[in-house]
Amino acid sequence: MSDRTTTPATLDDHLDATRDARLASLHEFLRIPSISALPEHAADARRAADWLADALGTAGVENVEVTETSGHPVVYGDWLHADGAPTVIVYGHYDVQPVDPLDEWTSPPFEPVVDGDRLLARGAADDKGQIHAHVVAAAALLATRGRFPINVKYVFEGDEESSSVPLEGWLTANQHRLAADAAIISDTGFFDGNIPAITVGLRGLMYAQIDVQLSPVDLHSGSYGGAVNNPAIALAQIIAALKGPDGRIRIPGFYDDVLELTEVERAAMADLPFDEEAYRAAVGVSALVGEAGYTTLERKATRPTLDVNGIWGGFQGEGSKTIIPAKAHAKVSTRLVARQDPHDVFEKLRDFVLEIAPPGVEVSVHLLGTGRPTVTPIDHPITRAAARGLEAAFGRAPVYRREGGSIPVAATFESVLGLPVVLEGFTQPHERAHAPNEWLDLGNYEKAIRAIVATFDEIAALDRTGGDRRSTDG
Ligand SMILES: [Zn+2]
């Protein structure tokens, strides 16, 4: 059994003594309006990257660079002197979402305000506060111990809120210097009630469009009605065939590669505190509906889905217009779970739609986008080390959660670099990421710094001969 290392007192003393300075520094970082989606903020994104590089360098992290991508820069830095110890990539993003609607903010989004335990600002939770905790942890380690317990490579991007596409190219181009044992992504949050959580699964995505064409132009419904098919009805028939009343998706082979939850995982999910009625009321719907045989928590995070995101065709104006529309369209997407392959799922959808296409219309299906699902084993040594690190700082063991959404970069680290991904994030639930009045719980932020140090110590203490590590450089 390897010895468990705890945060030494000197590190705590250092953190106690530097609290005001780090809050001032965090405010400074949050004041930079690094909105990645808006071209007029491109210079601000670069300013945030430069600020971050400066902070990493000041902390003592080495080889710090602001490096170019097809989008906003990636900030890289490393510390690689822990011979024989594991290497982790730490990932976060310095870009933020746009701020509108601005009039719903109680204070200007880029002028951080402390209100009790809350720090209000765009990016406070997602994700600048979490990156900042990593930088502070690095500075504290180097100031008090003069070293990290493991080897660390920081990768902070500026395009996450607008797709992470430039990062994928950057990771591919920089593969040679990104050898590691795992990636730690700090861009997720805790479970309801502020219970520490490690996200172990993210759903993927397949997004397609179905087009149904009857004729070159709309037809008079009096002259042609009864003699020709109607593309809107044909489209409705196709869509209705995709899913049964039991919530099961009827595309042949759709569930072939779905990794079913184990009994242990189902039991762990059932133990999560989740008030279904409160959830229903918060969503504002009359009933929760989903796939038969699964709970709401399972349905929204661990099961694949199929949804129509938009449907249109024919006359949309006021009053009436007696036509048979020339064409009808629908955007259809599926959320995917491990090990479904989005391209395979697209082919299955396309083949099924073409097979059931009613006569008298031209039906075509094309792919609009994909994202791969990810799943990290709960029993992976680095997941377990992160769990112990969270427990050391937050005083209770984390729960393991799956999220219904996608963090494309998680799949990218998995597929481009072949790394297991541990999603260790620190924000409170309901911190209004992407919404007006985003806030960060300052208690979580302080503990996050300790959790990061404790996680690194726990990773260093892993049995070096453990089988799950992939490669180390050095
Ligand atoms: Zn984020």
Image (cartoon, rainbow, N blue to C red):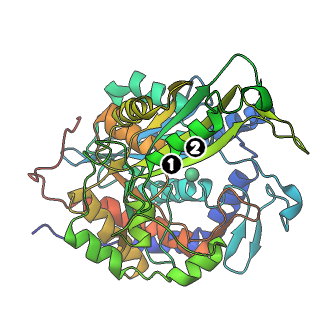
Residue at 48% x, 65% y: name it. Answer: 449
- Which quarter of the rendering shows the C terminus? top left
Is residue 182 depicted above or below 356 in this figure?
A: below
Residue at 33% x, 33% y: name it. Answer: 344
Q: How many marks?
A: 2
Asked if the residue at tag 1 contacts the one at tag 2, i.e. Cβ–Cβ closer than 8 Å, the answer is yes
Image-quadrant location for residue 106: bottom right
Residue at 34% x, 29% y: name it. Answer: 177
Residue at disc 1, secondary structure: helix
Dot 1 amino acid type = Ala
Position in image of residue 392 (x %, y %): 35, 76
Q: Which residue is mark 1?
A: 240
Dot 2 amino acid type = Ala
Position in image of residue 387 (x %, y %): 32, 68
Image-quadrant location for residue 417: top left
Q: Which mark is residue 109?
A: none
**Alpha-carbon span between mark 2 and mark 1:** 6 Å
Q: Which residue is mark 2?
A: 236
Residue 16 visible within the image: yes
Q: Identify which residue, 3 or 58, lies in the foreground.
A: 3
Position in image of residue 202 (x %, y %): 41, 53
Position in image of residue 66 (x %, y %): 57, 31
Residue at 31% x, 49% y: name it. Answer: 338
